[in-house]
Image: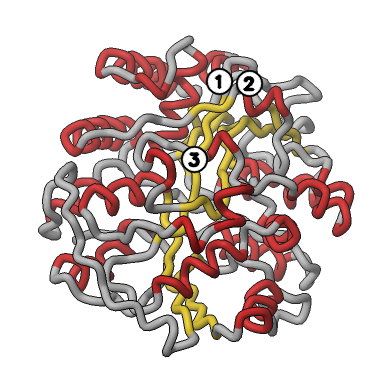
Amino acid sequence: MEHHETLSPPQRAALLRSMNGGRAALGRRSLLRAAGLGAVATAGLTACGIPAAGRKGDTAASTDHSAQEKVVNFSNWDQYIDVSDDGKHRPSLEQFTKATGIKVDYTEDINDNVEFFGKIKPQLSAGQDTGRDLMVLTDWLAGRMIRLGWVQQLDAAHLPHAFANLEQRFRSPDWDPGRAYSYPWAGIPTCIAYNKKVTKGRKVTSVSQLLDDPALKGKAAMLSEMRDTVGMTLLDMGKKPETVTDDDYDAALSRIQGAVDKGQIRKFTGGEYTDGLSKGDIAACIAWAGDLVQLRLDDPNIEYAFPAAGYMTSTDNLLIPAKARHKTNAERLIDWYYQPRIAAELAAYTTYVSPVMGVREELAKIDQSLADNPLIIPNAQMNATSHAFRSLSEDEDTRYEAKFSKLIGA
């Protein structure tokens, strides 16, 4: 099974910290988050013997040892949680342990959705404990795990803060209606970024400019994540990613292919677009909003825009795998991060969108500029123009990713 190694968002945070002489930078997830590169993710899952999705099983309830064992094993992405300035402490986790007596065995062992799924698949498919009680997965894979019956349904009685404070727009994704199996860790907006020094002060505010503007020829970039690049293109064409059809999808690919053929698009990138923007090799591109907070601090020439046609959003999500030993402890940890004060500590570090109501006021106590930053706290207008790519069937996923992979040369 082939995997593509990419620099994770939080790894980029660590890199930028080192480049900035150790100055505390805000972590973020700039990973090519969804399906590896092109069809590799979907094909890879099938090649590894994953049962066909869409047949959610009734996973037998596991024995919960939470009362006897005051521990929770938490797998997350690298640097995707608040860390003290000296790098030795994770304040929000330590506060949880102090408040509950539950020790958190925290492991940064998720570098790629597909790779991680391959790691835990043997135990899950055999109905065994993975050794993890809680994990963070991007929405497309979270939906697959739910369909396969490989995660546990959450007990609302253990999630009073989460139930009360989850923002309405995150409450019912089509892959987990009503959030029966998952809660968001962070929202991931996609926007347009540009270097105004390279564009000579001209604003870049639409995908049409990326695809057609002669002034950007050879210096425009798009993401190698299908749902973001195709989704943003669909919106620019007046189509909704929530209801995308085969014809819509093919039309969007044709639109992008035309730009590739005439040399408009310089490259399709993962998180490395940040370096190209800063150096001026890339004049404008599709970007992940969380990256831009730090980029704009480092380089005032970096600007961003959320197109009037709308923009794409996705989520990273907390899930409890089947047969986890400490389900209640894991639910208590999920609920912990839905307290606005704790959620603000997390958002201040990751600089991605918090799904928790009331976080703005708490962020203001930490740093008013963070509370006022629409990249972290989207305003009402932004919320009204955000869109999510609909869940794809197994067949659609395979076909769509194969076509996109061919387009980007993966």
| Residue ID for mark 1 | 207
Q: Can residue 324 be seen in this view?
A: yes
Assess disc 1: are there few (<14), some (14-19) or many (≥20) residues with their C-alpha within 10 Å of its C-alpha: many
For residue 23, side relative to residue 334 (left or right):
right
Q: At label 2, which amino acid type do we have?
A: Pro
State which quarter of the image contains the N terminus.
Answer: bottom left
Asked if residue 386 is positioned above or below residue 14 in the image, the reply reads above
| Residue ID for mark 2 | 307
Q: Which residue is drawn at 73% across and 31% down?
A: 379
Asked if residue 103 is positioned above or below residue 52 in the image, the reply reads below
In three-dimensional space, the C-alpha distance between marks 1 and 3, rounded to whole angstroms, equals: 19 Å
Q: Which one is earlier in the sequence, the residue at label 1 or at label 2?
A: 1
**Mark drawn on residue 127:** none
Give yes or no for contact between labels 1 and 2 (Cβ–Cβ under 8 Å): yes
Residue 123, given in percent of the width and then of the height, sits at 20, 73
Image-quadrant location for residue 190: top right
1 or 2: mark nearer the eye:
2
Residue 75, given in percent of the width and then of the height, sits at 45, 71
Assess disc 3: are there few (<14), some (14-19) or many (≥20) residues with their C-alpha within 10 Å of its C-alpha: many
> Which structural element holds mark 3?
strand
State which quarter of the image contains the C terminus.
Answer: top left
Q: Which residue is drawn at 68% across and 22% down?
A: 204
| Residue ID for mark 3 | 314
Q: At label 3, which amino acid type do we have?
A: Ser
In three-dimensional space, the C-alpha distance between marks 1 and 2, rounded to whole angstroms, equals: 8 Å
Image-quadrant location for residue 64: bottom left
Q: Which residue is drawn at 14% across and 56% down?
A: 50
Q: Which one is earlier in the sequence, the residue at label 2 or at label 3?
A: 2
